[in-house]
Image (tube, rainbow, N blue to C red):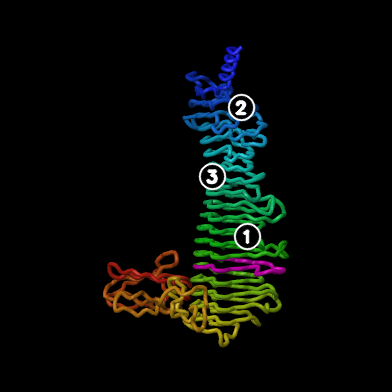
Amino acid sequence: MKVASSILLAALLASATPARARTFVVDQSGGGDFTTIQAAIDTVDTRNAPDTVVVHAGHYAEHLNFRLTTRFPNRTVPLLLLCPSGPDSTTALDFTNTRNEYWFADCWWLGRGLGFVSRCVPVPGFGGPFPLRWEQCKFFGGYDATSYGCQRGEVADCDFYASTRLIGYNTTFENLRFHRAPLVTMKECGTLLYSHCSFVGGPTDTLLYSIGGEDMVFRDCSFDSGGVGMNLSAFDCCGPLVERCAFRDLDIGVLVRPHSAKNWSAYIQASRFERCDQAVVSLLGDLDLVGDTIIDCREGVVLPSPWGTLDGMVFDRITGTALEMTTPAVLSTENGTALLTNSTFRNVGGTGARIRRFPAASGENAVQLRDNRFEDCDTAAVVLASRVALQRNVAFANDGAGFVMTLTSSTGTDSIAYNTCAFNLGNGISLSTTAASWPAAVRVVRNVSAQNGGDGFRIGAGYTGTFANNDAWQNYGAEYAGVTPGATNVSLDPKFCDLVNGDLTLSAGSPFAPGSAFGWAGAYGVGCDQALLDAPPLADAASLAVRPNPARGVVTFALPGRAATGALEVLDVQGRRVWRTPIDAGATNVQWRGEREGGTRAGAGIYWVRVQRGATTTQTKRFIWLE
């Protein structure tokens, strides 16, 4: 009896011992274990150690079927289907799988290097991760799948060449490449993350359609050459996050639209838009952009909403308007704030920021512009709204006006304070109202407007608000137009550190430096010990100077390096030469009366003067020419 029991126990133990992993080779020519991929798949023992199927190069006319109906033990090492020659040399028609009804820890099959010619529509697992995972594969005919609870997506490091649909539930998709393969994606629940994916389209393609709410993230992705890069919408109040993505050569970089009439938010952070017709267009909703760069686009951001936050943005080389925020009439009773802060606008062919907002029913400032800089725009900022806060902004060397503000309501609080406007061809700060009367609480205080081509301050008729502690200095028009300056407003040199080159910080000796008798005025504090133009002249190699600046009729250039011969050039803002004259040794100045080399007259605008004197001395200065 004991002997029989021992024999039976040994047999049972032997049968319970897992089989060793096996490797099967598939070769169409008969040089392996099988001539078809399906035969190898059917032979694999999924209950034991992970077998490997190696497929030699060839085009296999097979519809692969992975049968996964048996409940298998949880495993961390999947079965392998490996194609060493890669997806261009090793292909099948498509694949499917039987539905798996059980929970398991990870995918059962991992395939690498296989190409699929036809559209693949796998069946997801029920209540668990996706049973198949593909890496370094190519889907030439399209792909349509749903992932439930898979921490890693069922595809990674793969290429797609036809329309693709991915629905995720707590899923991460990494290193996917879409080649004129529009992606439709949706988050059903949990988190859906796309990381380091690339999308390349054709002239009118929409590269990605996304439907989902919060916890849907696109990070470190790129979108190139198409109609629309991302078409975003959401079911609920919170939309997706787009972070550190790149958008290039698109009609519209990101199009934000509601999935229903309900407003919702979208977030775009630390992303870059280049050579787009329009970088971001929001049809309805609250759009937050933080730390994004928009460069070489026709238009920057178009946002028709009473809400919106832009912080730390850079707009550069925009041919049209950089920021357009216009509230449609349907939202005229909605409360909200349009917030623009810490952003830079430069080289903008149109208006830097144009904001038109219906009167706010109640609440705080409906439009807030704080700590922004506008340089080389047509006009810095135009605001038509009520409850406006314009604070600590700079408008420098713009082709038109600095800040143009029109108040649309006789109620509420409006504040225009601590701004600096200098070297603009038009007025520095303009303020008017379309309401029957001025708001009682409007304040224009501690602004600096210097050396503009128009008026320093132009205030509309009948102004009744506070106007105090402002400075208007050497503006070509009136210092104060439409308002009596009174005793608290002055016309003093603010002593910028280097006005001509755009350094509008104050020298320590400025009458408007913090702690001075007058008190702080303007956007910036102290940035140097002494203003550059206050420095004593040197006997030789002195700094190039421009007098007057702005200039009309004639401008004088005081020359450096008197001992050497050289040449002086006037350049436009694109760096093209307008005029040139030789400089004799010992010459101390050159005058220019606006003539061009071809005999025509130079128009009003921003120009550069460049002096080359001797072998090493080259200096440039920027100046305003008013004809």
Which dot, 3 or 1, sits closer to the camera?
Answer: 3
Q: Reading the chain from its start, which is encountered first: label 3 or label 1?
A: 3
Q: Reading the chain from its start, which is encountered first: label 2 or label 1?
A: 2
The front one of 491 and 320 is 491
The front one of 159 and 347 is 159
Viewer can see residue 457: yes
Q: Reading the chain from its start, which is encountered first: label 3 or label 2?
A: 2
Crowd tier of the residue under label 3, counting other residues whose Cα lies within 10 Å: few below 14, some 14–19, many 20 or above: many
Kindly indicate the quadrant of the structure image that contains residue 356: bottom right
The front one of 267 and 282 is 267
Residue stretch in magenta: 352-375
Name the kind of residue labelled 3 in the image.
Cys
Q: Please tell me whether residue 57 is drawn above or below residue 1 in the rendered image.
A: below
Q: Real-space Cα distance between discs 3 and 2?
A: 28 Å
Q: Is residue 360 magenta?
A: yes
Are dots 2 and 1 in contact, CB under 8 Å? no
Q: Is residue 11 magenta?
A: no
Name the disc covering residue 303, or none: 1
Q: Real-space Cα distance between discs 3 and 1?
A: 27 Å
Q: Which residue is mark 3?
A: 197
Crowd tier of the residue under label 1, counting other residues whose Cα lies within 10 Å: few below 14, some 14–19, many 20 or above: many
Q: Real-space Cα distance between discs 2 and 1?
A: 49 Å
- Label 2, secondary structure: give it: strand
* Residue under the image location 28 percent in, 69 percent down: 614
Which dot, 2 or 1, sits closer to the camera?
Answer: 2
Name the kind of residue labelled 2 in the image.
Asn
- Image location (x, y in percent) of residue 181: 57, 41
Name the kind of residue labelled 1 in the image.
Leu
- Label 1, secondary structure: give it: loop
- Image location (x, y in percent) of residue 495: 45, 79
* Residue under the image location 48 percent in, 74 percent down: 525
